[in-house]
Amino acid sequence: MLEMQWGDIAPELRGANYFKTSDLHFGPRYNYAYQFLYVFFGNVAGTVNGQSIQLESGECCLYGPEHCHEFICEKEEVVVGTVNFSWRLESPERLAMKNSSMKIRTPDLKRLSDPAYRVAGLPKLPFIIEIPDMRRKEFELRLRETGINFRQSDDALNVLKYKSALLDMIYIIISSIRDQTATTEHPALGAMKKFIQKNYASNINRATAAHYVGISESRLTALMRRDMQCNFTEYLTAIRMDAAIELLLYSRQSIKEIAAQTGFNDYSYFVSAFRKRYDVTPGTVRRTASLPI
């Protein structure tokens, strides 16, 4: 994967859309460049490379070359905008593909797709970012105008205008990421962590945690992926494993008792998950009295 610094970014607009619909079916397609989808209004569900995506108003999902994306919203009005772009000017052969993501993989897809750039400071693709209120008006103005008018004229001045608009939108996305990573943790995540620490031994799940902190399950998942780079099950399992290690090292309970006490109702699953996570068995930790790496 090629590293790209922010100073190297000179984005090239490949395509743009803006539309309102009550029957959204966007994809499935394989993308050949980079693309973001932004929700002006409503809720959109989808997948990118098999990863579940939930977007609410004001949220943007960015994904990249050879990512298979699909977004759906039925019987509910939504307003969305999309922009397809390259991080910098690519070869004429690549740019000639225009804005028509391939529905199936062809031999040319890999050859003509944009390089897989890793832009310094950006999360791993795909990722979701919420555009903050103070930047949303400007972002939506640029995206709406670009999506409506991009194909209407090949005039050189218009090309320059929309390249400038794209640069503004990318700047807002990057700035929003920097702002959010620099701010304090979302209150819902703090409340969720306290809830899990108190109740990890019980039969809890994402639904009970989301209800406790007062947000939807999809919103909780989006916040965890954005700020913690994990999902609910992964985090809950990690907390349970930490508790199990403490008991293995410092208690006289049997391993079966420890599994049950830390929320693992299935002893065989506990042993299997422990070995997968630490590459040793619970019995080894008990015998050696040493922390797994």
Image (cartoon, grey):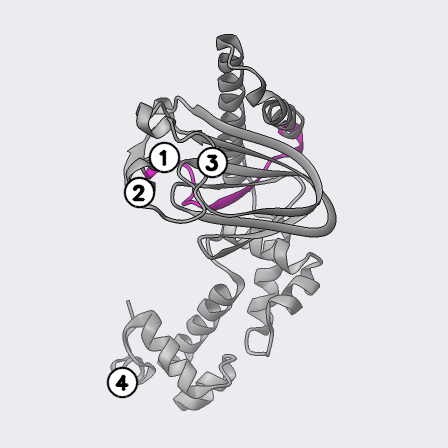
Residue 15 appears at what percent x and percent y?
50, 29
Type of the residue with mark 4: Arg
- Start and end of the magenta stretch? 116-135
Crowdedness near tag 2: few (<14), some (14–19) or many (≥20) residues, C-alpha within 10 Å: few
- Label disc, if present, on residue 110 of the rendered structure: 2
User: CA–CA distance between discs 1 and 3?
Assistant: 28 Å
> Badge 3: few (under 14), some or many (20 or more) residues near its Cα, within 10 Å?
few
Label pair 1/4, CB-CB below 8 angstroms: no
Name the spot of residue 208 as percent of width and height, x first.
66, 69
**Label 4: which secondary element:** helix
**Residue 139 at x, y = what percent?**
61, 27
User: Viewer-nearest of labels 1 and 4?
Assistant: 1
Give the secondary structure at mark 2.
Answer: helix
Give the label, 1 or 3, closer to the camera. Answer: 3
Q: Magenta segment: does it hold 122?
A: yes
How packed mark 1 is, by other alpha carbons closer than 10 Å (few <14, some 14-19, many 20 or more), is few
The residue under label 3 is 100
Residue tagged 1: 120
Q: In the structure shown, which secondary structural element does the residue marked by tag 1 occupy?
A: loop
Q: Residues within 10 Å of mark 4 (few under 14, many from 20)?
A: few
- The answer to which of marks 2 and 4 sits earlier in the sequence is 2
Left/right of residue 118 with respect to residue 208 in the rendered view: left
Q: Quadrant of the image for the N terminus?
A: top left
Label located before the other in sequence (3 or 2): 3
Q: Report the mark closest to the observer, 3 or 2.
A: 3
Nearer to the camera, 193 or 96: 96
Say above or below: 197 vs 176: below
